[in-house]
Amino acid sequence: MLQLAEFQDCFRTSKRIVALVGAGLSAASGLPVFRGSQGMWKNFNMIDLATPDAFYIDPGLVWQFYLWRREKALAAKPNPGHQALANLSKNTAKQFVTITQNVDGLSARAGHDPRKLHEIHGSLFTLRCTSFSCTFVDHNNFTQPLTPALEAQNEYEDSLGTASPSISPSFSPTKELGVADLPKCPACLSLMRPGVVWFGESLPLRELDAIDLFMEAGRVDLILVIGTSGTVYPANSYVEMVRARGGAVAIFNTDIEPAVLDGAVERTWGFQGDAAETLPRILNQLVEQVEARSE
Ligand code: BV8
Ligand code: ZN
């Protein structure tokens, strides 16, 4: 319980807080994580589906994958973990931003202050034109299906179920789709692509600049590292950046290194469990207290 008391003290005195969020925050909403025993990538190779080359080689396959992801995300609901961060984003006593690697849109749907939410890997609900001479971007596109040919993907064996993913999801494309079957740009009729950041692609500069501005405006006292394996760069670099400048680290994850749980890692606390349970239980009361004190 020492960890909790120390964390609470740190939270109360922290002026500037960052949350770094990964797929584990959305696990309780029924969306598959990427790595580990229930990981999405276990069943199919991310190189086949989440890279520019994959899209160039077989846009129909990649669009079916992202359509399946859109359908799952639309059927999912934000959970109390998303809600806890949304509450903190509305708290005026703290300067706070969420950096999310998730593309599922659940933090936005939980009511998170959009000015303090940075979706650094893009969104399933953004589409972008593939033409170099066209800048058309379609934000908040929740249309299902995006084209008649992308209709009724529910033929996928969907081993995810709704309550909780018990085994790795299995996505298998149901159709051979050509470019003619896929979403087109209303401005120039070129092929549209999912507005997510694929491996090997740079992250949206607008989001990176906004995060840098926040980081440079003053020391970040605390970073909440929630439901992420910390595998992917440059998202994972923010944790070391905060720690190197004297900030503290609080990890909310189902898997936490024993050294952290034993309190053996300097200014690093670990709260093991489902973030949809641990985050609200640990954060909500603290946020209410600081809110009350600031009124
Ligand atoms: C770039 C969008 C440069 C698409 C994604 C070799 C070494 C190091 C780095 C590299 C390397 N080779 C290449 C790189 C760079 C590469 C990279 O980091 N690769 C990794 C795999 C090694 N990075 C890039 O390519 C990035 N771009 O570097 O560009 C550049 C610069 C200029 C110009 C040109 C290029 C782009 C990376 C973005 C890739 N896109 N997603 C899509 O979603 O389909 S990444 C993908 O992984 C998702 O966004 C996901 O969010 C992200 C990170 O994964 P996590 O969120 O952490 O999820 P994961 O499953 O891994 O972990 C879940 C965690 O939750 C686990 O810890 C688990 O224990 C926990 N958990 C589970 N259940 C719960 C829970 N916790 C709490 N509660 C629960 N209930
Ligand atoms: Zn276009």
Image: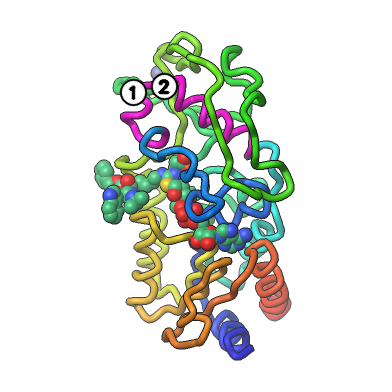
SS for dot 2: helix
In the rendered image, residue 57 lying in the magenta stretch gets the answer yes
Residue span colored magenta: 49-72
The N terminus sits in image quarter: bottom right
From the Cβ of disc 1, is ligand 1 less than 8 Å away?
no
What label does residue 261 carry, if any? none
Above or below, 177 relative to 38: above
SS for dot 1: helix
Q: Amino acid at mark 2?
A: Pro
Please give the residue where the numbered disc 1 appears in the rendered image.
Answer: 56
Is 227 placed left or right of 49 in the picture? right
* CB under 8 Å between discs 1 and 2: yes
The residue at 46%/30% (across/down) is: 194
The residue at 42%/63% (across/down) is: 214
Q: Position of residue 206 (x, y in %)?
A: 39, 46
Please give the residue where the numbered disc 2 appears in the rendered image.
Answer: 59
In this view, the residue in front, 188 or 67, is 67
Furthest-top residue in view?
A: 180
In the rendered image, residue 169 lying in the magenta stretch gets the answer no
Furthest-bottom residue in view?
A: 2
